[in-house]
Image (spheres, rainbow, N blue to C red):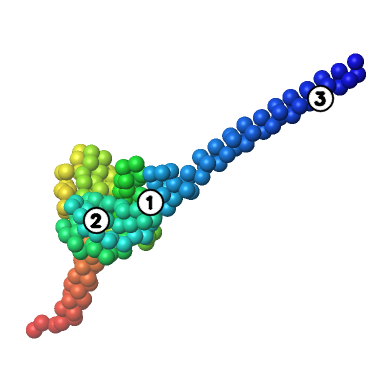
């Protein structure tokens, strides 16, 4: 009885061991399959070699991050130029070379520029680059910095000169240069009551105005205040001239009164 039980136990042990080995083998095969699949990114996949796969992987990361890439224009083609990124041939359309219109792409051959990846497709081998967006962003940033500097230099109470750039029902916008505009409210345009800025102003007209407010990048101007100051100044000059004339007249009267006529 004991011997028979011992044989059964042996058989069960053998079966259990075999099951464990089979399970382990299956798991090892799965691990091997996953490892082989993972290795395709580094060993090629039969259609693309390792370097090509890695290059496109980097290029897609550049696209996602919007990274700025320094490249050299290495060729001229129809409607654009060629530049290499990670060994992959990239196309830059002529419309994306500059913020200005490009007439002759031959002038760009050998030129170092900065680009972003805007389209990347390994299957079709399509890699499209652009320099225009970078230049637009930098131009906008420089313009903003220039404008902020110009605004900071405009002191309240100072007199500025500009050109009427637009007329609205509520007032007129004056171009002060350096991408800075100031608003003259309709109540600050004339000493007389007006219903529309068009009654006294026209686009392109040169005007002078007093700065009455400079806050949060917004400039408020007054043409009326400057006119009132000018009128007051002229009236004061007239008063002074009258006073001087009266003084001269009095002095002459005193002189004549002292004369004796025979």
Q: Earlier in the sequence, mark 1 or mark 2?
A: 2
Residue found 41% across the figure and 44% down from its top = 46
Outermost residue, left direction? 262
Labels 2 and 3 touching (C-beta < 8 A)? no
Q: Which mark identifies residue 259?
A: none
Q: CA distance from mark 2 to mark 3?
A: 78 Å
Report the front residue among 117 and 195. Answer: 117
Q: Which mark identifies residue 81?
A: 2
Labels 1 and 3 touching (C-beta < 8 A)? no
Label 1 environment density (alpha carbons within 10 Å; few <14, some 14–19, many ≥20): some
Is residue 108 at least partly visible in the picture?
Answer: yes
Please name the residue that numbered disc 1 is placed on.
217
Label 3 environment density (alpha carbons within 10 Å; few <14, some 14–19, many ≥20): few
Q: CA distance from mark 1 to mark 3?
A: 91 Å
Q: Earlier in the sequence, mark 1 or mark 3?
A: 3
Left or right: 236, with 142 as reference point: left
User: How many labels were placed on the picture?
Assistant: 3
Q: CA distance from mark 1 to mark 2?
A: 42 Å
| Residue 24 location (% of width, % of height) | 67, 33
Q: Earlier in the sequence, mark 2 or mark 3?
A: 3
Q: Quadrant of residue 199?
A: top left
**Marks 2 and 3: which is nearer the front?**
3
Residue found 24% across the figure and 56% down from its top = 81
Left or right: 33, with 222 as reference point: right
Outermost residue, top direction? 1
Left or right: 249, with 154 as reference point: left
Instruction: Identify the element where label 2 is drawn.
Output: strand
| Residue 89 location (% of width, % of height) | 31, 53
Q: Which mark identifies residue 10?
A: 3
Q: Quadrant of the C terminus?
A: bottom left
């Amino acid at each position: 009885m004991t011997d028979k039980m011992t044989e059964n136990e042996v058989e069960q042990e053998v079966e259990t061991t075999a099951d464990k080995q089979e399970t382990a083998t299956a798991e090892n095969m799965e691990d091997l399959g996953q490892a082989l699949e993972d290795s395709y990114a580094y060993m090629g996949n039969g259609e693309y070699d390792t370097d090509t796969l890695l290059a496109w992987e980097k290029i897609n990361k550049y696209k996602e991050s919007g990274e700025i890439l320094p490249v050299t224009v290495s060729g001229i083609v129809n409607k654009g130029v060629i530049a290499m990124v990670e060994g992959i041939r990239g196309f830059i359309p002529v419309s994306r070379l500059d913020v200005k219109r490009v007439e002759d792409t031959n002038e760009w051959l050998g030129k170092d520029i900065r680009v972003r990846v805007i389209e990347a497709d390994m299957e079709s081998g399509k890699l499209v680059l652009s320099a225009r967006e970078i230049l637009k962003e930098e131009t906008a940033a420089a313009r903003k910095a220039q404008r902020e500097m110009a605004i900071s230099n405009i002191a309240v109470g100072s007199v500025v000169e500009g050109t009427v750039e637009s007329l609205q029902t509520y007032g007129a916008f004056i171009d002060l240069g350096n991408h800075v505009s100031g608003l003259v409210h309709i109540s600050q345009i004339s000493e007389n009551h007006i219903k529309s800025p068009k009654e006294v102003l026209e686009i392109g007209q040169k005007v002078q105005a007093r700065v009455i407010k400079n806050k949060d990048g917004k400039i408020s101007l007054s043409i009326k205040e400057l006119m009132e100051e000018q009128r007051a100044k002229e009236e004061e000059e007239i008063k002074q001239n009258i006073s001087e004339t009266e003084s001269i007249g009095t002095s002459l009267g005193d002189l004549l009164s002292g004369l004796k006529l025979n």
